Image (cartoon, rainbow, N blue to C red):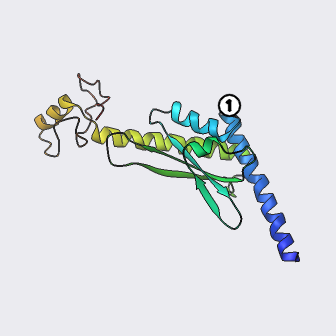
């Protein structure tokens, strides 16, 4: 082993320790022991049903792990980033991933990584709500927008009708498409 290889190994070890400390702070902040539990909580306890993917470091490259595979990751997996996003049912689109880089040098302490994860989750929730409100108006919402002269309105429940926040029919919540 050359000195350069040794140095690289030590650097990667230190980065792994930083990433694990930041991940542990996020898990602790949410009362979770595993990333799988964190993913389940993100889905279950957000209005938008946020999803989580994680970036795992491998030899010379990283891999993004999605869906059920996140649940099956061992607790010591070399996770270097968490990706948070959401789909919005009924429309072709969703919220693009917000990435929390566990190696971010701006995190002077692990609690800052937890705060960054919480902000990412809040931003995803807000973006999903905005998409919903732009596309999930009911038929009463659609009639309101037509009466107001908005020409871009649809017929309601069609993926193009905005939610009217004072709608007596859906209480400003929109409708399932």
At 87% from the left and 77% from the top, the residue drawn is 2
Quadrant the C terminus occupies = top left
In the image: residue 80, left or right of residue 8: left
Give above or below for 100 relative to 8: above
Residue 35 shows in the view: yes
In the image: residue 96, left or right of residue 66: left
Q: What secondary structure is marked by label 1?
A: loop
Quadrant the N terminus occupies = bottom right
Across and down, in percent, residue 155 comes to 16, 37
Residue 109 shows in the view: no
Nearer to the camera, 148 or 70? 70
- For label 1, the crowd category at 10 Å Cα-Cα, with few meaning under 14, some 14 to 19 and many 20 or more, is few
In the image: residue 69, left or right of residue 32: left
Across and down, in percent, residue 107 comes to 69, 52
Nearer to the camera, 114 or 72? 72
Q: Which residue is mark 1?
A: 31
Across and down, in percent, residue 36 comes to 63, 39
């Amino acid at each position: 082993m050359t000195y350069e290889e040794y140095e690289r190994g030590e650097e990667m070890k230190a980065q792994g320790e930083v990433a694990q400390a930041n991940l542990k702070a996020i898990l602790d902040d949410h009362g979770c022991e595993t990333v799988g539990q964190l993913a389940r909580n993100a889905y279950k306890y957000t209005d938008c049903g946020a999803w989580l993917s994680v970036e795992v470091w491998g030899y010379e490259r990283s891999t993004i792990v999605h869906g059920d595979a996140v649940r099956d990751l061992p607790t010591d997996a070399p996770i270097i980033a968490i990706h948070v996003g959401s789909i919005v049912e009924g429309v072709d689109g969703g919220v693009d991933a917000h990435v929390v880089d566990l190696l971010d040098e701006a995190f002077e302490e692990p609690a800052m990584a937890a705060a960054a994860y919480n902000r990412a989750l809040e931003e995803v929730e807000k973006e999903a709500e905005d998409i919903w409100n732009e596309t999930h108006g009911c038929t009463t919402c659609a009639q309101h927008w037509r009466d107001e002269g908005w020409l871009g309105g649809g017929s309601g429940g069609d993926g193009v009708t905005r939610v009217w926040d004072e709608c007596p029919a859906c209480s400003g919540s929109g409708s399932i498409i």
